[in-house]
Image (cartoon, rainbow, N blue to C red):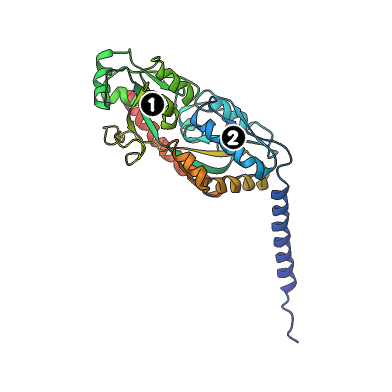
Amino acid sequence: MKPTHPYMHLLRAGLAAALLGAATLAAAQADWPTRPVRVIVPLAAGSVTDVVLRAAAQELQPRLGHPIVIDNKPGASGVVGTDACAKAPADGYTFCAVYLASMSINPHTIAKLPYDPDKDLVPVGKLFYVTEGLFVPATLPVGSVAELRSYAAAKGNAVNFGTLGEGSLQDLMVAWLNNEWKTRIAGIPYKGGGPISSALGAGEIQVGMMGVGNFTGLMQAGKVKPLAVSSQQRSPLLPQVPTMQEAGLGGFTAHVWWGLAAPAGTPPAAVERLNAEFNRLLKDPKFAEFLQGRYLVPAGGTSQEFAAFLRTDREQAATLVKLAARQSAR
């Protein structure tokens, strides 16, 4: 009989503990949720992200066994909703939609940000990238970015640009345009892509830049027209519309994305289960087609990959903010 290695009992004990831990995590994931799950959306109802998450909630309810309740808390470039999420109980029943502004731009533009993206929130997973579009009302006498530039220069401060508030991506775009074009475009704050698209369609503002999906109905109704899109190549759904680069706006580029986060301390089992369910949904051909029809590109990935992405994205956002700040200082 072979002699037993003196540390074999420790190895066996460690393996047993690891297997027990894995079984416990699997059981916890299977047990969660036991009641409705809330997802805070930091935009007004009707925005394309809100529409997508409501559709996802319907798809996931049968799998989770309980509903996902969408709670809209718009305002201040995502601050209102994200702060509410950060301060919610970390019990696995509150999550929130986060995006470029709330996690990457706001830390650089808001001096007293009420939440710390690193300490107060835990990443759950990336959802999708947004194809942004620069839009004007159909009645505005411009048909290109170059014509918009001439129009804005001639109109002084009579051109209004819809934004999500001070320090938002749109607000930074206004600062950049004014200094590149030597114009006086004014930023007008709204609480989401839905309100911005409605204001544009009604002629309350002259320029809007949000996810193209926010403007689909208005485009079909002939009330707004796209001048450029943020994708690297022309969208197959709008092949006649140039990219930002082609239209002369390549000096200001940002890839808008959306993901999910939760209050720090949320049970890992809840985080990983929701991540797995959304990843499965994003790979579903019908749901992927649903996203693509709204000019969104599915993302997905692990919570750890999302955390690493956020660190890099915040560094890139710092460069964007510095660019706008330098332009404003001119």
The foreground one among 16 and 294 is 294
Q: Position of residue 87 (x, y in %)?
A: 64, 31
Mark 1 closeness class: few <14, some 14–19, many ≥20 residues within 10 Å: some
Residue located beneath label 2 in the image: 96
Q: Position of residue 123 (x, y in %)?
A: 57, 42
Q: Residue furthest bottom?
A: 1
Q: Position of residue 132 (x, y in %)?
A: 39, 33
Residue located beneath label 1 in the image: 219
Count of picture labels: 2
Q: CA distance from mark 1 to mark 2?
A: 30 Å
Kind of residue at badge 1: Met
Whether residue 303 can be seen here: no
Q: Residue furthest front?
A: 221
Q: Earlier in the sequence, mark 1 or mark 2?
A: 2
Mark 2 closeness class: few <14, some 14–19, many ≥20 residues within 10 Å: many
Q: Is residue 327 above or below residue 129?
A: above
Which type of secondary structure does the marked residue at label 2 adopt?
strand
Which type of secondary structure does the marked residue at label 1 adopt?
helix
Q: Residue at x 33, y 12 (%)?
A: 158
